């Protein structure tokens, strides 16, 4: 018997990008770069781990949420600063988010040659077969 999840949970934020850009300056890549810089500059350590995966304009967020739920995706709307409102209705620029994985650092990992001076697979790396 296993646990079955009904939905995939995906994080989103809706940002009024006109606060940061004029219409002439707007491109989706510029908007994504601005949001990513906001994440990187955040004082909240958890927020700094997020990045934008994609962006789109949604004219009816309620309808878009229902469509996502029909496809077994549960949108989770978040804010990345205390001044930002969480928008779940109306229209807006929708940014899909992902959480960056922490890179594994190999500190403390050393390669030791075996008795013959060679490094041969797991045994050569100090493991047991």
Image (spheres, rainbow, N blue to C red):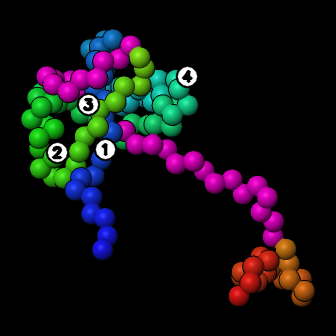
Above or below for 12 versus 67: above
The main secondary structure of the magenta stretch is loop
* Residue plotted at (20% across, 27% down): 88
Magenta segment boundaries in residue numbering: 83-111
Residue carrying label 2? 68
Q: Residue at x 51, y 37 (%)?
A: 49
Mark 1 or mark 4, earlier in chain: 1
For the residues labelled 2 and 1, say whether their Cβ atoms are less than 8 Å apart: yes
Q: Using the image, determine if residue 2 lies above or below residue 12.
A: below
Q: Nearer the viewer, residue 121 or 21?
A: 121
Membership of 60 in magenta stretch? no
Q: How packed is label 3: few (under 14 Cα within 10 Å), some, or many (20 or more)?
A: many
Q: Name the residue at 38% across, 30% down.
A: 32
Q: Residue 11: image x %, image y %?
A: 33, 39
The circle drawn on residue 43 is 4
Q: CA distance from mark 2 to mark 1?
A: 10 Å
Q: Is residue 25 visible?
A: no
Mark 2: secondary structure: helix
Q: Nearer the viewer, mark 4 or mark 3?
A: 4
Residue under numbered circle 3: 94
In percent of width and height, residue 127 lies at 75, 79
Q: How many marks?
A: 4
Is the residue 4 above or below the residue 128 in the image?
above
Question: In what quadrant of the picture does the N terminus appear?
Answer: bottom left
Extreme-front residue of the structure: 1
Structural distance between the alpha carbons of marks 3 and 1: 12 Å
């Amino acid at each position: 018997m296993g646990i079955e999840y009904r939905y995939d949970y995906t994080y989103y934020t809706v940002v009024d990008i006109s606060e940061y850009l004029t219409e002439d300056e707007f491109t989706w890549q510029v908007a994504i770069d601005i949001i990513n810089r906001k994440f990187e500059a955040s004082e909240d350590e958890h927020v700094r781990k997020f990045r934008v995966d994609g962006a789109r304009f949604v004219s009816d967020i309620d309808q878009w949420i229902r469509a996502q739920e029909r496809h077994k995706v549960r949108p989770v709307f978040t804010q990345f600063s205390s001044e930002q409102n969480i928008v779940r209705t109306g229209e807006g620029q929708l940014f899909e988010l992902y959480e960056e994985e922490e890179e594994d650092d190999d500190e403390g990992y050393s390669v030791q040659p075996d008795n013959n001076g060679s490094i041969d697979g797991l045994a050569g790396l100090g493991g047991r077969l």
